Image: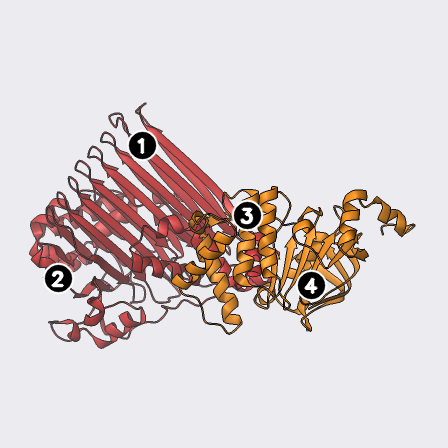
Chain colours: A red, B orange
Amino acid sequence: MSSNPEIAALTNREYEAGFTTDVESETVAPGLDENVIRRISEKKGEPQWLLDWRLRAYARWLEMREEDARWAKVTFPKIDYQAISYYSAPKPRKKLGSMDEVDPEIRATFEKLGIPLSEQKMLSGVAVDAVFDSVSVATTFRAKLAELGIIFCSFSDAVKSHPELVRKYLGSVVPYSDNYFATLNSAVFTDGSFVYIPPGVRCPMELSTYFRINEAKTGQFERTLIVADEGAYVSYLEGCTAPMRDENQLHAAVVELVALERATIKYSTVQNWYPGDKEGRGGIFNFVTKRGACRGKRSKISWTQVETGSAITWKYPSCILQGDESVGEFYSVAVTNHYQQADTGTKMLHIGKNTRSTIVSKGISCGHGQQTYRGLVEIHQKATGARNHSQCDSLLIGDKCGAHTFPYLDVRNASAQVEHEATTSKISDDQLFYCQQRGLGTEDAVSMIVNGFCKEVFRELPMEFAVEASKLLSVTLEGAVG
Amino acid sequence: MLEIRNLHARVEGKEILRGLDLVVRAGEVHAVMGPNGSGKSTLANVLAGRAGYEVTDGSVLYRGRDLLALTPEERAREGVFLAFQYPVEIPGVTNSYFMKAATNAVRRHRGLSELDAIDFLTLVKQTMKDLEMDEKFLSRSVNEGFSGGEKKRNEILQMLLLEPTLAVLDETDSGLDIDALRIVADGVNRLRSPLRAVLAITHYQRLLDYLVPDRTHVLMNGRIVKSGDRSLALELEKRGYGWIERELGAEAPA
């Protein structure tokens, strides 16, 4: 507990992205049955094989129980899946030919969120595939990327323009039967992003998607698929915000990454979904399945996440290291304030020889926040020479929050080297006083100390997003000290 | 510059300072000496405004203002600097980033322009050279993994960057070898000016060989019980504190 009275005034910031956009939406009535799935598929003009895949997932989902997905250290009321609307699309006023034709209200929303959708901002080098509720409304830089043979488009477009690629890789990393929420997603996913980098191509810019949940009571079920062919490189950033809603909203996304021989995929997330109010009412349930497969020799997948939002975060971006000498990385900063709960971590499955993985997890808890790191490092029998290093650090601010660490190690090859380090610390009054005695205000001091704590993760983020993440962290922590 | 009158302060309910009087004028260097538990560090922390140090009576005027009414950061910006007895480690925050943020916070308050990265580096590198500090300390985390002597030198570096009006040194000399002691004292001497004052709290008089004080005070049982010039420090070194206690006679601790 902090004995410094000034530290007490810092975390009561209102959620800045809390506004809704008044756009006429086309929303399917709440409820889920086979007909809803057929309708989603039909609206999107999908081929039969994809509808069949959705229906198989739905059939599987009906046999699953949500309770089986409740092993995480989080608590939430029973979700009424029949009360959710599974499809919501803004009605376009006309067919969109260019950015200028995007609904002005939608553009205004994106601008409030600070998303660089206008042409000039895009020239700064960020190509944005914006998902507004469930349908992509604008895709930029596609032409420029197309010159290199890079495909960067909405998932729906990819189904139409590159069905062979989608069919080949969809569900190949996260099968439709994977887990309760991923299976639900497989049945009802509406849109998302698709990326394909051809052999030997280094994507010249950061690819970026911003998600936004706008319609009341609509769950959002994105599906993202990124494939880096042999020797390709891509860095992808996902940013998420949602307007303020009283009801809890379900967000069950699936992200699949495939890296072939010598390919590298770097996937960064900055998540600030609505966390609920100070009493823990409302907020997003963020139940996400993210997994990457390093299929080829010397391939590499690196996950970096900064999770500051959501009422509940349930998320384990993982790597399947199949290729020999492949590399998996997981860098995470998660912050829980007020009544937020986070159970997050990773799985590193070492299958190939001389595979390496690195896990750096930084958890920050304040208010009544509860935070869990849960990670699995599995070294298979044939994974000779596999190495893992895990480091899990927790920082507590105040005395009503909690931090928990559950590392699971399963090593079946005697040549493996596995290291795990964990620390728990508090922002000490001594540190704060030291900063203050040098003329720094309390907020600046807390922000500096926490940023220092997160440094190893922030430096993995692309530069411009590292700055954003650092700001977001300060915002989330306002009023945390007290 | 600094006028302390009848200062009473408690730490965890225990009265440590019991009517301390001390006046330091601009341009002067004062040494405060005393046995363990006499209240030396409490005095330093009360002046800097550390939480948990409760002032129950008395007043502290700093340049004519009520120092006790200011927050710790306001005191720092107004020119009160405390060189910590135990400098604190801040992992992940580089020393240069920290010192630049501090320097600019103080400069802003004084109506000076902020230093950009290049100006700051020029300044800090020159100052480090004077203190015989390796530049590698710029990119290391604040005090993390520093030896005792390196930490103390780092305190003096910050002091020189922040150019305080009143510098309070809380046993800055403890744990220093003779070379480091000389360097630290040189740093403090550089700061001396007719507009500044230094309050050096110390256990041993050896610092005072280099940092010749204008006045020396003996702190015992929470009060200044004897004041003198430089020779008092030498006498304390030779004879210890016992004779002062005897001189004070029957006055027993409360």
A233 versus B45 height, above or below: above
Q: Which mark is residue A387?
A: 1
Q: Name the residue that disc number 2 marks.
A: A142
Residues indicated by labels 2 and 1 sit on the same polypeptide chain: yes
Q: Position of residue A268 (x, y in %)?
A: 28, 52
Determine if marks 4 and 1 fall on one subunit.
Answer: no
**Amino acid type at mark 3:** Lys
How many numbered marks are there? 4
Query: CA separation, marks 3 and 1?
Result: 37 Å
| In front of the other: A208 or B89 | B89
In this rendering, position of residue B223 left or right of residue A439: right
Parent chain of label 1: A
**Discs 3, 1: same chain:** no
What residue is shown at x 38% (from left), y 48% (from top)? A456
Q: Which mark is in front, 3 or 4?
A: 4
| Horizontal side of residue A323 vs A251, given as left or right | left
Q: Are marks 2 and 4 on the same chain?
A: no
Q: Which sits earlier in the primary sequence, circle 2 or circle 1? A: 2
Would you say the residues marked 2 and 1 are in contact, meaning their CB atoms lie under 8 Å apart?
A: no
Amino acid type assigned to the residue bearing label 4 in the image? Glu
Residue that carries the numbered disc 4 in the rendered image: B28
